[in-house]
Image (cartoon, grey):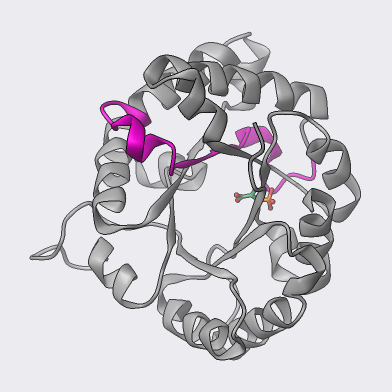
Amino acid sequence: MSRKPIVAGNWKMNLDRTKARELAAAVAARRGEAAAVDLVLCPPAVYVETVGTTLAGSGSDVGLGAQNMLDKAGGAYTGEIAPPMLVDLGCDYVILGHSERRTLFGETDSAVNVKAKAALAAGLVPIVCVGETLEEREAGRTAAVVTAQVQGSLAGIPAGDLEKVVVAYEPVWAIGTGKVATPEQAQEVHALIRGLLAKLASPEVAGRVRIQYGGSVKPDNAADLARQPDIDGALVGGASLKADDFLGIARAFA
Ligand code: PEP
C-alpha cells in the first residue's frame, strides 16, 4: 500500500508576523525539493491568514494548518476558534490533541474525539496526536496508553472519514528534548496504531491512513525513520522553524 508521505511543521507559539511570512515564503519557494511529499505549515492562529496569503501568492501547494480549534461551529466561546473560521482562512488541516494541549490544557481523548469529528465535518483533515510519557514507557505501558488514546480519540468516526485522518505518534519524552525514538521503537508503535485502525475500520482503510512520527525529528535522523514501513512522514516542532531543516526532513521522506 503506497501512502504519500506528509511532513507538517508545528510552529507552536513562535515567530512574529514578519518572520512567519518569511518562513512560509522560503518553504514555498523550495517546495520542489520534496515534491513527492505533502508539506503543511501550522502557524500560530493569529498568523494563519498571513501564512495562507503568502502560500496562496506563491502558487505552491504547501498546505495550511492550525494547531487547535473548538468543536463548535460558532457562538459564545470567548477566545476560541471555530472550524469554519479555519476553513474560511484557507486551512486544510488542524492539529488535535497535541501533548502540550493534553498536559497543559487538560485535553482528553473524548475532547479530541469530538474535535476530530467537527474538523472532518467542516472539511478539515485532523492530525490527531498520541504518545506516551517517559514514566508510562518505563512502566511498560506504551501499548496500553497509545491504544486507549487511539481508540478514544477516533471512536465512532466512519471508515470513509477515518482514512482521511492523519495520526501523529509523538512520544512525549521525545518532544523538544533532543531525544528521538529509535526507528525500531517508533516503527513498533506505528505498527500497533495501524493494527488498531484496522480493527476500528478495516485493513484497507488502515493501509491508507498516514501515520507521522513526531519528537525531535531533525534532518540527520529523518532518513532512518523514513525507511520504516509504517512511518509516513513527520510532525516537526523545533526544526520546522528553519526552512533548511524543515526541507531537509521533507527530502528524507521524498
Ligand atoms: C511537536 O511539538 O509536535 C514536536 C514534535 O516537537 P519537536 O520536533 O521540537 O520535538
Q: Quadrant of residue 116?
A: top left
Q: Is residue 214 above or below residue 125?
A: above
Q: Nearer the viewer, residue 180 or 243?
A: 243
Could you say which is closer to the camera, residue 218 or residue 102?
218
Picture coordinates of residue 88, whole percent (x, y): 29, 76
Q: Is residue 182 visible?
A: no
- Name the residue at 41% across, 78% down: 46
- Left/right placement of residue 139 relative to residue 97 reads right
Point 77% across, 31% down: residue: 181
The quadrant the N terminus occupies is top right
Q: Is residue 110 magenta?
A: no
Report the number of discs.
0
Q: Residue furthest top?
A: 140
Residue shown at 80%/40% (left/top)?
226
Magenta residues, start to end: 153-179
Q: Is residue 202 left or right of residue 77?
A: right
Q: Position of residue 199 (x, y in %)?
A: 42, 14
Q: Residue at x 44, y 26 (%)?
A: 150
User: Seen from this angle, which residue lies furthest right?
Assistant: 220
